[in-house]
């Protein structure tokens, strides 16, 4: 019942703020969260200790994934400053990071090649994005590290499953996409 009340209060607040013409996108989420927290504390004052424990545990559990991701982004930023960063894009352990580095490095070469072979840039980007997912299989990938931290699993226990999801499935997908792209050029 309390979450439902929180949703109703949030919606009422959003409607009121929108009606008055305020900057709802900035003010409303914060005010709605405060309103929900206050409503919970007013309706169930005995649960304050449980709420504080839950918030404390949530904060503790969020610190490691946040810092892991932040450190890998910073590491990728430093690698991007190096002259040979495209060669070591995989070091970032991130599909999006590796793809961004590869596109920035090789766009001037890839665009003429794609145009010469009548391959649409949208199709090329989709194929590159699907292929780059294999970088997520690296053991230092932020998503994998966070997944393992949250689930309490180890690399030894989960690496086969991560490999299937980040290598085998994308490989099957890229083969299908390339085959369909060449069989049916209008899909490009």
Image (cartoon, helix red, strand yellow):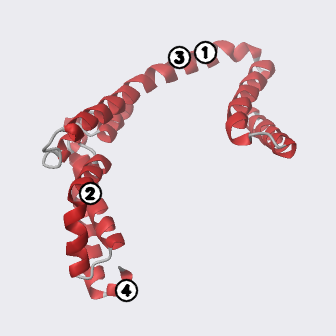
Residue 56 in the image: state x and y as whole percent: 53, 17
What residue is shown with label 3?
A: 56
Q: Earlier in the sequence, mark 2 or mark 3?
A: 3
Q: Residue at x 76, y 22 (%)?
A: 38
From the image, state whether disc 3 or disc 4 is nearer to you: 4
Q: Which mark is residue 103?
A: 2
Q: Residues within 10 Å of mark 1 (few under 14, many from 20)?
A: few
| Residues at marks 2 and 1 touching, judged by CB atoms closer than 8 Å | no
Q: Residues within 10 Å of mark 4 (few under 14, many from 20)?
A: few
Residues under numbered marks 3 and 4 in contact, where contact means CB atoms less than 8 Å apart: no
Q: Position of residue 21 (x, y in %)?
A: 82, 43
Q: Is residue 133 above or below residue 1?
A: below
Q: Alpha-carbon distance for marks 2 and 4?
A: 24 Å
* Residue that carries the numbered disc 4 in the rendered image: 186
Residue pictured at 28% horizontal, 36% vertical: 77
SS class, disc 4: helix
Please state which of the two labelled residues, at mark 2 or mark 1, is closer to the viewer: 2
Q: CA distance from mark 3 to mark 4?
A: 54 Å
Do the CB atoms of the residues marked 1 and 3 lie less than 8 Å apart?
yes
Which mark is on residue 52?
1
């Amino acid at each position: 019942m309390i979450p439902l009340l929180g949703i109703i209060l949030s919606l009422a607040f959003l409607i009121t703020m929108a009606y008055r013409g305020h900057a709802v996108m900035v003010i409303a989420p914060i005010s709605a969260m405060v309103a929900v927290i206050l409503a919970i504390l007013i309706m169930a004052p005995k649960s304050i200790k449980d709420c504080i424990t839950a918030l404390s545990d949530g904060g503790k559990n969020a610190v490691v994934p946040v810092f892991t991701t932040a450190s890998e982004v910073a590491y990728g930023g430093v690698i991007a400053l190096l002259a040979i960063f495209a060669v070591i894009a995989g070091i970032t352990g991130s599909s999006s990071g590796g793809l961004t580095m590869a596109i920035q490095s090789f766009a001037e070469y890839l665009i003429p090649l794609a145009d010469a072979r009548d391959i649409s840039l949208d199709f090329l980007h989709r194929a590159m994005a699907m292929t780059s997912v294999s970088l997520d299989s690296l053991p230092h990938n932020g998503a994998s590290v966070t997944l393992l931290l949250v689930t309490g699993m180890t690399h030894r226990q989960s690496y086969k499953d991560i490999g299937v999801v980040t290598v085998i499935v994308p490989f099957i997908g890229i083969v299908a996409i390339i085959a369909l792209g060449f069989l049916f050029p209008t899909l490009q």
